[in-house]
Amino acid sequence: MFKKILIATLAVSGLVQPAIARQTGWIGTAEWARISRTLSDRGEMPVSVKCKDTGNRGLNWKSSIANVRIEKNPDHRRWYWWFGQNYGRAKTRVEKQGYKLVSHSVYQRASGLKINCGIWHKSK
């Protein structure tokens, strides 16, 4: 109880910034691409992702949806995300650049094709 009161008091006084996180909810990958372009300007970054099939025919931006958790990025950590086709190549490329995978999700389409999505962070 004392700890909660202390944290609340420090947060109100401005000495401690509370961790603010939000979820996007289930959104299309095109919407996620639009949101992701604004995160750096807002001092935020994605920290986890879940992806799933929409049931739409074909393999394109409309065939996947994602639910992404976003948190503050006070250290201005660099990050990268990838969904779908060529996931393996993207993973290899960014990990060679020093990025570490922080969240990964995979689902299987009715055809048996597995679709991956992931988020990587890079320390300065």
Image (cartoon, grey):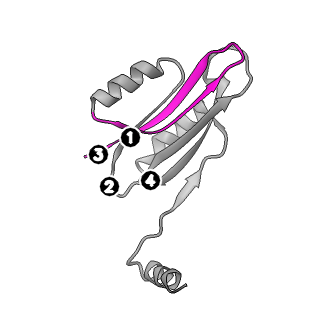
- Which corner quadrant holds the N terminus? bottom right
Q: Amino acid at mark 3?
A: Ser
- Residue 53 location (% of width, % of height): 68, 27
CA neighbours of label 1 inside 10 A, class few (<14), some (14 to 19), many (20+): some
- Residue 121 location (% of width, % of height): 37, 42
Query: In the figure, residue 120 lies in which quadrant?
Result: top left
> Along the horizontal axis of the image, is 95 left or right of 52?
left
Kindly report which numbered mark, 3 or 1, lies closer to the viewer in this rendering: 3
Cβ–Cβ under 8 Å for marks 1 and 2: no
Instruction: Residue under label 1, please give it.
Output: 79
Q: Amino acid at mark 1?
A: Trp
Instruction: Residue under label 2, please give it.
Output: 75
Q: Point out the tag, 4 or 2, that comes first from the N-terminus.
A: 4
Cβ–Cβ under 8 Å for marks 4 and 2: no
Instruction: Please tell me how many numbered marks the rendered image carries.
Output: 4
Q: Amino acid at mark 2?
A: Asp
For the record, the magenta segment spans 98-124
Q: Point out the tag, 1 or 4, that comes first from the N-terminus.
A: 4
Relative depth, front residue between 108 and 51? 108
Q: Amino acid at mark 4?
A: Arg
Q: Which label is found at residue 123?
A: 3
Q: Residue at left 58%, top 23%?
A: 115
In the image, residue 105 lies in the stretch drawn in magenta: yes
Q: Which label is found at residue 16?
A: none
Instruction: Residue under label 4, please give it.
Output: 42
- Residue 80 location (% of width, % of height): 41, 36
Kindly report which numbered mark, 4 or 3, lies closer to the viewer in this rendering: 3
For the stretch drawn in magenta, what is the main secondary structure?
A: strand
Q: CA distance from mark 1 to mark 4?
A: 14 Å
